Image: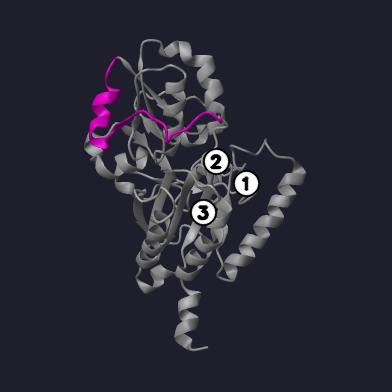
Amino acid sequence: MPRCVLLRNRFPLPYLGIMYTIAALYKFTRFTDPAALKPPLEALCATHGVKGTLLLAPEGVNGTMAGSRDGIDAVLEHLRNLPGCADLEWKESTSPTPPFGKMKVRLKREIVTMGQPDVDPTDRTGHYVEAAEWNDLIARDDVAVIDTRNDYEVAIGTFDGAIDPETQSFGAFPAWWEANKGRFAGKKVAMFCTGGIRCEKSTNYLLGQGVEDVFHLKGGILKYLEEVPEAESTWRGDCFVFDGRVSVGHGLKVGPHHLCHACRRPILPEDKERTEYEAGVSCHQCINDTSSEDKSRFRERQKQVDLARKRGNDHLTGSMVPEK
């Protein structure tokens, strides 16, 4: 094999001065046979070296992927040609390092799991609010602001005054709402999430529960952080993202967080100095959540990860998934 090919395969794109393009996308539409869409999508991603995770379900497509500019454009064009996806929207950012280690195209029952069969974002959703108009809306006394993300995401950043449901999964949101809906009588409800997908379902759900005035941040936190100047921002902290960057801040700059590969929660560099931390095995947030047998399995897994890294195959980020 020629030496130039060996070098190209050994080193990631940034070594050659090329940035990775990251595209986060979703589209609610009706796929009659999602399984039939999987093989050509996998083949196209492999051809263009695009990596990440894409979910296909009867209700549509969701995912985050990364690769060269040409590769991302090719996959986006393919996705736009799927049934009902001509107006597919996505958000882009860049990274000098690979945010994913492999490509996964998965079949799911839902592209974001809520477990409410009557929820249908293609029927109706709340009022979209542009990033530039969000601050004015959530500052109103008659508006309650709800963060629909998981507790570990909210913990590292949220909007001023936002209510944290403290849910561990999006599927727990309906039960939380049922238990707390009395708090919001007579209020308009504004909701937000990372990229907008969860709010498509949560606003439809609230409308179905009889809430008349429901709003959600168009494009999610990522669009807000991209467009609203930090000096005018009401966002505090960082935003967890479902790729190897772990978190981003204003201007979508990569944040300070790392990932605990035992519990998949974000941690700060100083958290690695705590006695509870062991790479791939535990952190201060999860050390008491797993058994000694679990930790033994995690140690063996971490050993394999370390060996893969030494061979130049960093596959850790391949296990990240789209927001859920």
Residue 110, numbered circle: 2
Q: Which residue is mark 3?
A: 53
Q: Earlier in the sequence, mark 2 or mark 3?
A: 3
Q: Please, is residue 37 above or below residue 247 in the view?
A: below
Whether residue 115 is visible to the viewer of this picture, yes or no, is: yes
**Residue 191 point in image, percent of width and height:** 39, 28
Residue nearest the viewer, comparing 40 with 251: 40
Q: Which residue is mark 1?
A: 262
The 10 Å Cα crowd at callout 3, few under 14, some 14 to 19, many 20 or more, is many
- Quarter-of-image position of residue 285: top right
Residue nearest the viewer, comparing 63 with 296: 63
* Viewer-side label of 2, 3: 2
Looking at the image, which residue is at 30% across and 39% down?
224
Kind of residue sitting beneath label 3: Thr
Disc 2 + disc 1, Cβ < 8 Å: no
Give SS at disc 2: loop
Residue 175, numbered circle: none
Kind of residue sitting beneath label 1: Ala
Report the Cα–Cα distance between label 2 and label 3.
Answer: 14 Å
